[in-house]
């Protein structure tokens, strides 16, 4: 039985991990291809068209969109959305001026609280838009966030 020293074991583990990378890439391909087209949209209008299927979007006063007025660190801007609308099924978050406007889509299931909290990167001063999909239609809340230094290339 061969005994390996620690450097030999480390090198062998590294080689095994490197050899597994192509398989991991192939395995993740179906997951990436199953993302909605709206995540590859490069303009806000294209992303909205994909998300809504042409349905109209209405403002709704009960959607709470909590974002800072001024983002001093544009690399991690806090965004919180609470949408206590009957039958809320999905919450989408978009940033108008980002290279890829659609940031997040969260599905609301069963008795789940319609709430999303995340930190996002912002390219420049822009509107942050929260869309809430319900059986009665698609509703939105939007707020402008001033960015002091860009975060997206």
Image (tube, rainbow, N blue to C red):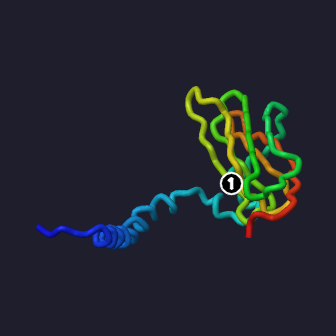
Please give the residue where the numbered disc 1 appears in the rendered image. Answer: 103
Q: Residue at x 69, y 27 (%)?
A: 86
Q: Residue at x 81, y 42 (%)?
A: 141
Choose top left, top right, bottom left or bottom right for residue 97. Answer: bottom right
Comparing 73 with 26, the one in front is 73
Relative image position of residue 30 (x, y in whole percent) = 45, 61
The quadrant the N terminus occupies is bottom left
Side (left or right) of 8 relative to 153:
left
Comparing 56 with 115, the one in front is 115
Relative image position of residue 36 (x, y in whole percent) = 59, 56
Side (left or right) of 52 relative to 26:
right
Task: Rate crowding at label 1 as few (under 14), some (14 to 19) or many (20 or more) other CA atoms within 10 Å.
Answer: some
Q: Residue at x 84, y 46 (%)?
A: 68
Choose top left, top right, bottom left or bottom right for residue 81. Answer: top right
Relative image position of residue 153 (x, y in whole percent) = 74, 70
Task: Kindly state the secondary structure of the residue where label 1 is placed.
Answer: strand
Relative image position of residue 31 (x, y in whole percent) = 48, 58
Q: How many callouts does the rendering have?
A: 1
Choose top left, top right, bottom left or bottom right for residue 151. Answer: bottom right
């Amino acid at each position: 039985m061969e005994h390996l020293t620690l450097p030999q074991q480390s090198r062998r583990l590294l080689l095994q991990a490197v050899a597994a990378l192509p398989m991991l890439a192939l395995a993740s391909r179906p997951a990436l291809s199953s993302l909605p087209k709206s995540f590859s949209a490069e303009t806000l209008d294209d992303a909205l068209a994909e998300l809504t299927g042409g349905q109209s979007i209405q403002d709704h006063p009960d959607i709470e969109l909590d974002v800072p007025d001024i983002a001093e660190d544009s690399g991690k801007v806090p965004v919180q959305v609470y949408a206590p609308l009957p039958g809320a099924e999905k919450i989408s978050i978009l940033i108008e001026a980002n290279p890829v406007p659609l940031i997040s889509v969260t599905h609301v299931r069963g008795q789940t609280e319609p709430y999303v909290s995340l930190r996002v990167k912002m390219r420049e001063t822009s509107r942050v838009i929260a869309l809430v999909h319900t059986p009665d239609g698609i509703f939105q809340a939007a707020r402008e966030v001033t960015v002091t230094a860009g975060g997206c290339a």
